[in-house]
Image: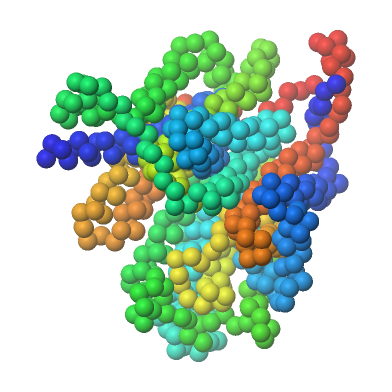
Amino acid sequence: MQLKLEPRGFQSKFWSYASPVLAIALTIATMAVIFLVLGKDPVISLYTFLIEPLVAENGATELLVKASPLILMGVGISLAYRANVWDIGAEGEFTIGALFGGGIGLAFPDLPFALLFPLMLIAGMIGGMLWAMLVALLRTQFNANEILTSLMLTYIAQLILIYMVTGPWRDPQGFGFPQTAMFSANATNPTIIEGTRLHLGIFFALAAAAAGWLLLTRSLLGFQLRVQGFAPRAARFAGYKETRLVWTALALTGGLAGIAGTLEVSGPIGQLTPQISPGYGYTAIIVAFLGRLHPIGVVFAALLLGLSYLGGEAAQIELALPSAVTGIFQGVLLFYLLGCDTLILYRLRLRSSRPAALRA
Amino acid sequence: MDFQYTSFLLSVVVASTPLLLAAAGELVAERAGVLNLGVEGMMLVSAIIAFAVAVTTGSSTLGILAGVAAGVLTSLIFAVLTLSFLSNQVATGLALTIFGTGLSALIGKAYVGMVVKRLPQIHIPGLSDIPFFGPVFFGQDVLVYLSFALVCAIYWFLFKTHAGLVLRAVGDSHDAAHAIGFPVIKIRYLAVMFGGGMAGLAGAYMAIAYNTSWSEGMTAGRGWIALALVVFATWRPFWLVVGAYLFGSIMYLSLYIQGFGVHIPSQFISALPYASTVVVLVAISRDRKRIRLNAPASLGKTFHAAG
C-alpha cells in the first residue's frame, strides 16, 4: 500500500478553507507534545498559551494591539506575494518607517496633534516605501533577487535604527540608555479605550484590509497583480508591465509596513529604542499565508499569531518557558499549513503497489 | 608586522569557513533544482546542538557530528514538505528559518553563558612552525581543511561523475530527467540532505570554532549570505571559495576597523557585509544572460510526476 498524491485538476475551494483549520489543530497538538517534552503539563501549558491571554484583564485589547501591525503588513505582503514578488523585508520597512515617522515626531514636538500626527504617518509611509522601492529598483533594473536584497536591507535597517538611538537621536536625559526622548503628547498615537493600550492602529489595520480587499477583487490593478503571479506569460501577452507591477507591489508593502512602524513607536512604545519589533515583519509573512494571501483572511490570521505573542509572554511569566515558544509555534504552524495546502490541488489516494507495477 | 598579517589571515579563514561550508551545501541542492531558503535556520539549530553536545561530552568531534545530524534532520522537514507534499519552496524555506530560529533559542536558553573548548588547530611539528606560511597553511583546524576538500569533492562529483551529471540534469529539467527514468524525487532528497549536513557543519563551526559560546541568533545572517554566495559563484564550486573568502575578509575587516578606533560609527561598519551582499548580487545578477546560462533551469520549481 502506498500513499499517492493525485492532481485534482482544479483548486479545491473546501480545502483552501479547511487547510488552515487542520493546520492550526495539528499545530496545537504538536505544541502539546513540545510542552510535554519540556516537562510541563500540556493541558495547563496550552491553556496558558492560548486561552489565558484572552480571558486576562485587557486580553482582547492587547490582542488587537499585537494584531494591528500584523494586519497592516500582512495585507501588503499578501498583495505582493500574489504577484510573485517575494519581499521578506517587511521588518526593515517597518523599522525605517518608524524612523521617518518617529523622526518627524521628535523634530516638531509642539505642532498641533491634528497636523503633526498625520505628518508622522505620511513620513512613516514614505520611509517604508523608499526602503521597499530600493528592493524594487534592484530587482527591476539589476535583476537582483528580491528575497536576498530585502533581507539584507532588513539587517541594515536594524543597524541604522541602533545608530540613530545610540548616536544623533539619543535622549540626553536618558541616563545613557540607547533610546530617544519620549514622544510629546501631540506626537503620540492616542489610545482609544481608557486604561488599555489599544490605539488608532486597529482602525488603520481594518481600513487597510478593506482597501486591500477592494483592490484585489474589484480593481484592474488587483487583477493584474493576480495574473502576474498566476500566469506571468499571460500577463505579458496582455501587455501588463511587469516592472510597474513589481514597483507597485513593493511600494504598497513598504508603505503599509512604514505606517505600522510609526503607529507602533508612537503608540505602545512611546519612543524609539533598539527593539521596536518582536519580529512582526517576519510573522506577517506567516499571517499572509495563513490568511490565504487575502486581506480579509489576514485579519483572522493576525489575531491567531498576535495571540502567539501574548501566549509566549504568558508562558514565560507563568511556566518559566523561554518566549522562543512563540517562534516555534509560528514555524510549526507554517510547516503544517504548507503541508495541508497540498490538499487544495491534490487528493491523497491509497494505492496498493501492485496495479502500479502492472501498469508499468 | 609579520605577526599581524598572520593573525589577520588566520582570522579571515575562521570567518570564511562557515560561509564556504553552508554555501557549498546549498550549491549542490540548487544544482538539483531545489532552492532551500532555510540555511540560516538549519545553521542555528546545528550550532546549538553541536554546542550542547560538545559542552556535555567535552568532545568537539561528537559536537560536529551532532551538528551535521541536526542539519540533515532539519533539512528533512524541508524535503518532505517540498518534495513529497509539493509545497512552495520559498515559503517552506522561510518557515524553516523561522522555526530554526525559535527552536535554537528554546534549546539554547539552558546553555547561555557556558563556554566550550575551541576546536583545536592542527599542529604539524616543523611545518606549522614556519613563519607566516606555517600557521596559515598548516595550522588550521580540521574543518577548514575539510571545507576545501569538500569543495573539490563537490566539483569532482558534479562535473566528473555520472551521478553528478544526473543530479545536474534533474536540476535543469526535471521532466526530461524523469522521462529518461531518473528518480527525480530521490535525487532531490539526497541533495537537500547533503545541503543540510553542510549547513550543519557550518553551524557547528560557528558554535565551537568561530565562537566558543552560544548566543541567540549567533549566525547573524550568514545563512542568507551563503545563499547570495551561490548566486555570486553562478553555481560553480570554485567561485564559492573566492566569494566566501571575500566575505570572510569583509566580516573580519569590519571587526578589525572597530578595534582600531576609526571614527566611523560601529553600526556602519557592521552593516558592511550586508551592504556588500547587495552590491555583489547586483553586480552578478545584472548580467541576465550569465545568470540564465548558469542557473539550474528548474530551480525552485515543484515537480510532480504525472500518473
Quadrant of residue A201 in the image? bottom right
The quarter of the displayed image where residue B23 is located = top left
Residue A87 lies, in percent from the top left, at 55, 51
Q: State whether residue B123 is above or below residue B245.
A: above
Image: B95 above or below B202: below
Viewer-nearest residue: B73 or A126: B73
State the image coordinates of residue B178 (x, y, percent, origin top left). 67, 17
Look at 20% across and 35% down and name the residue there: B6
Can you see residue B196?
A: no
Along the horizontal axis of the image, is A50 left or right of A146?
right
A292 displayed left or right of A132 = right
Where residue B97 appears, x then y in whole percent? 57, 45
Q: Residue at x 69, y 46 (%)?
A: A37
Q: Residue furthest front?
A: B57
The residue drawn where x is 47% and y is 81% is A183
Q: Is residue B111 left or right of residue A33?
A: left
- Residue lying furthest left in this view? B1
**Is A3 positioned to the left or the right of A337 in the image?**
right
Residue B243 position, x and y percent, is 36, 34
Is residue A317 visible in the rendered structure shown here? yes
- Hey, which quadrant is residue B166 in on the image? top right
Residue at image x 34%, y 30%?
A: B141
| Along the viewing direction, whichever of A292 and B55 lies nearer the viewer | B55
The quarter in which the C terminus of chain A is drawn is top right
